[in-house]
């Protein structure tokens, strides 16, 4: 890959000339690459082969990630904020990456009337819900937790139950569930 430095005479140079492709990166630098050779008939035949069920599923998930990335890059300001801090990434890159990563619940600390939850995501955890169950798995109490510092969430629950279910959501809508 060749980087091109122009001395002000040509700015924003991009496109294809002969077998060379000129691309402008988000940081303003221009990169020259060689064009891909045309596909042979053997490569075209391989492209027409049926994909396995796992490949089709992955392709479908990837299409969903791309659709989310296109929408979210324009509508969710947090992705633009992250892109402003990272010069070689766009809001779209952050949105697609966020789609692939579900939130994680790291730790649950239970006190007398308060339950603390540590949950994180590669971009943002949007909501945490705590459900307290009795010995027969009946819901005694269900509440939304309140964000405290960074990855910590707090929920005031008066019910004394045997089990706790914690659910965490991120911007794309993925839910992670932890049962203790």
Image (cartoon, rainbow, N blue to C red):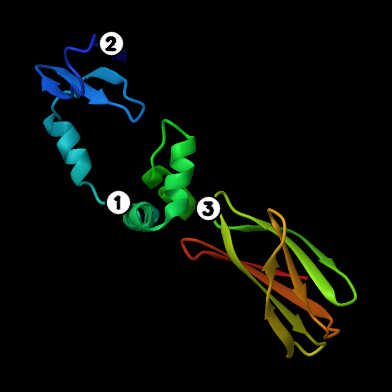
Question: Which one is in front, 33 or 39?
Answer: 33
- The answer to the question of whether label 2 and label 1 lie on touching residues, with beta carbons closer than 8 A, is no
User: In the displayed structure, does residue 178 sit left or right of residue 160?
Assistant: left
Residue 135 position within the rendered picture, expressed as x and y whole percent measured from the top left: 82, 87
Q: Which residue is mark 3?
A: 101
Q: Residue furthest right?
A: 112
Characterize the local packing of mark 1: few (<14), some (14-19) or many (20 or more) Cα atoms within 10 angstroms.
few
The structure residue drawn at horizontal position 39% and vertical position 53%, both measured from the top left corner, is 58
Which is in the foreground here, disc 3 or disc 2? 2
Numbered mark located on residue 5 in the image = 2
Mark 3 secondary-structure assignment = loop
Characterize the local packing of mark 2: few (<14), some (14-19) or many (20 or more) Cα atoms within 10 angstroms.
few
The Cα atoms of the two marked residues, 1 and 3, are separated by 25 Å
Q: Which residue is mark 1?
A: 51
Q: Residue furthest front?
A: 8
| Vertical comparison of 53 with 136: above or below | above
The structure residue drawn at horizontal position 36% and vertical position 58%, both measured from the top left corner, is 75
Q: Quadrant of the N terminus?
A: top left
């Amino acid at each position: 890959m060749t980087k091109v430095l122009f001395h002000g005479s040509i700015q924003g140079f991009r496109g294809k000339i002969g077998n060379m492709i000129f691309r402008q990166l988000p940081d303003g630098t221009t990169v020259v690459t060689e064009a891909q050779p045309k596909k042979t008939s053997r490569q075209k035949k391989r492209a027409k082969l049926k994909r396995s069920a796992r490949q089709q599923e992955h392709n479908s998930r990837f299409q969903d990630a791309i659709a989310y990335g296109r929408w979210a890059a324009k509508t969710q300001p947090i992705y633009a904020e992250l892109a402003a801090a990272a010069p070689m990434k766009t809001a779209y890159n952050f949105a697609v990456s966020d789609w692939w990563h579900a939130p994680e619940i790291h730790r649950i600390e239970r006190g007398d009337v308060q339950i603390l939850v540590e949950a994180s995501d590669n971009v943002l955890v949007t909501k945490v819900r705590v459900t307290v169950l009795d010995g027969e798995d009946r819901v005694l109490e269900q509440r939304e937790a309140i964000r405290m510092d960074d990855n910590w969430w707090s929920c005031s629950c008066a019910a004394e139950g045997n089990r706790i279910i914690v659910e965490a959501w991120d911007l794309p809508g993925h839910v992670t569930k932890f049962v203790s």
